[in-house]
Image (spheres, grey):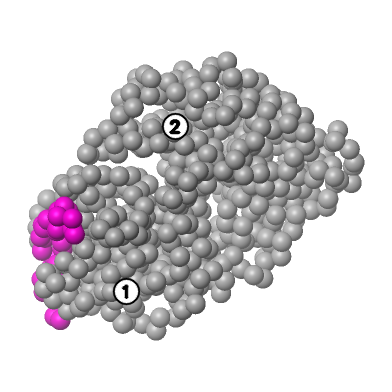
Amino acid sequence: MRKLLFILPACISIFTFRSASAQTTVTYTRQEAMIPMRDGVKLYTVIFKPSNVTGTVPILIERTPYGSEDAQSPDKSSYEKDMAAEGYIFVSQDIRGRYKSEGQFVMNRPILDKPNEIDESTDTYDAVEWLIHNIPNNNGKVGQLGISYLGWTALVGAARPHPAMKAASEQACMSDLFLGDDFHHNGAFRLSYAFDYSFMEEASKVDTLFPFDHYDLYNWFLKLGPLSNANAKYFHNTLPSWNLFMAHPNYDSFWQYKSPLRYVDYPRIPMLHVGGVWDQEDMMGPQLMYAKMEKLDSNNRNFICLGPWNHGQWAGGNVTKLGSYDMGSNTSQYFQQNIQKKWFDYWLKGIGDGNFAEATVFQTGSNQWKTYTSWPPKEATVKKLYVAAGGKVSFDKPTAAGEDTYDEYVSDPKRPVPYRSRPIEQTYGANSRWYPWLTEDQRFVEGRPDVATWQSDTLSEDITVTGSIIAHLFAATTGSDADWVVKLIDVYPDKIKHNLKMSGYELMIASEVFRGRYRKSFEKPEAIVPGKAEEYRIDLHQVNHTFLKGHRIMIQVQSSWFPIIDMNPQRYVPSIYDAKAGDYQKATMRVYRSSEYATYLEFPEM
């Protein structure tokens, strides 16, 4: 949910921008206001108005916890300059309790739907009401957009919209914070991220970094030990979100009430969901919210765009790479000009035909933009890609029988598998490689005895997978709890003459973690029976990727991903957050590949 770090402060109040299409200059003036909410709390707001545009124009609002005072003029922002060139009123507002706004901050304050109660949807409603009556030369139409936390405020603003709100675009929004975004994935706690983000947002009214005394946080979190030490040694129960994490280890009524799955229903106004397939923070949000709203979309108001990006990367000016992955074109420019601008121009200005593709999704591997009439596409053929003997994968189901047909490894809590190559820098600290980690070369785990690997022979033709990747993992442990991490990897040819640096590269296409205690229910965890083979169904989320001829397909399974995921004790305790040092133990993990227990990935091929 972190703000974009490349946004620069604006220090003057009048700016100009040369429109390439109209060859006119649009000048923006800056205004500040404290807008009153229904309970009397005032929210700090920055307004940029075009001063030399004839007629009325729409309002575009962003609502942020990251501070609006240094908001960049829209004509200087690559994210908005195409719209700014033709005239909009741009608004940036600090949500309550953050930076220069009054009131109390509550992280991801859910929609309450209670009389006389305030939440982010009521604050959005009140802000829109004030803006349309107090900002001259607006046309009475308002749109809301934003990335990350700002994407979530766009989601909740559109969930209970003001009548003047005509369209929204939630981008990289968080969804369910226990099932799949930010702080947990399938019940597994996102330790290093939750630690950093909670402190950053709640230790002060402005963003503040935790003062680590280590640079490589792999070592720091190992020394931290059990999770209870975070409060005992550092936070001292002062961070509300961290305390709530520790108090609610399971998917109880607290998490369910906070979830957008509860309060977001049908698209009450046109909604464009935008996400990145390598989003390191909120990959699931746009996919999950699109799917939830699509089931109730009777007016064709629900659309999605997925690109080859990390968290919010499409806001950049010239985005052609993520880490070592080369996209082959300026994908952010394509999005800003051909999708985002056309979206708001149509709904707020009446420009264009409104003939939007249901889904616009970049296909990695082949580096092409594709459009679909449904998402995931119904025409995909679901195949099964099995792990097989000899470290191979196969589209044929194993024929060997018996529970003794497996591969195994030992998972040691004292030596967990790092989630990226070391050193592991502070999430938002100096020189952090957090942002592109999902595209990092997976060869850094090669040779580790606690990572199981299977791969195909060299492909003789392209294979394109489009849609949801679901892992069906049949596995057992000698412990009574376990984490399972599954990765789908594109292995590049051993030598690429025109791009030697990518020779043998292992690009992670899809991945996810699952905490074993939740295999039957996220609400009611159960210990694993040691030695018993069980199925774990793990959603690796949506992809659109071509494994090119000459490449290989790899599947990996491991039981730690540290410290992005806290270390499972591998011994069942009622709450891992209360585990003691003595609860952490080694365990032997078995991944089965027999006719009865056949581990495979659902592989939607196009």
Dot 1 corresponds to which residue?
166
The span from disc 2 to disc 1 (Cα, nearest Å) is 40 Å
Query: Looking at the picture, how far across and down is residue 101, in whole percent?
Result: 17, 49
Q: In this orientation, which residue lies closer to the viewer: 63 or 407?
A: 63
Query: Looking at the picture, how far across and down is residue 167, in whole percent?
Result: 34, 71
Q: In this orientation, which residue lies closer to the viewer: 222 or 18?
A: 222
Residue type beneath disc 1: Lys
Q: Residue furthest top?
A: 582
48 part of magenta stretch: yes
Q: Is residue 463 visible?
A: yes
**For the residue carrying disc 1, how many other residues have a C-alpha within 10 Å: few (<14), some (14-19), or many (20+)?**
many
Residue depicted at 36% across the width and 82% down the height: 352
Query: Looking at the picture, how far across and down is residue 303, in whole percent?
Result: 46, 69
Using residue 355 as the reference point, say whether residue 548 is left or right of it: right
Dot 2 corresponds to which residue?
246
Query: Looking at the picture, how far across and down is residue 457, in whole percent?
Result: 76, 47
- Give residue 433's mark: none
Residue type beneath disc 2: Met
Q: Secondary structure at mark 2?
A: helix
Q: Is residue 553 visible?
A: no
Count every numbered label the image shows and give the total: 2
Residue depicted at 69% across the width and 33% down the height: 528
**For the residue carrying disc 2, how many other residues have a C-alpha within 10 Å: few (<14), some (14-19), or many (20+)?**
some
393 part of magenta stretch: no
Q: Secondary structure at mark 1?
A: strand
Proximity of marks 2 and 1: CB atoms separated by less than 8 Å? no
Residue depicted at 59% across the width and 65% down the height: 376
Magenta extent: 26-55
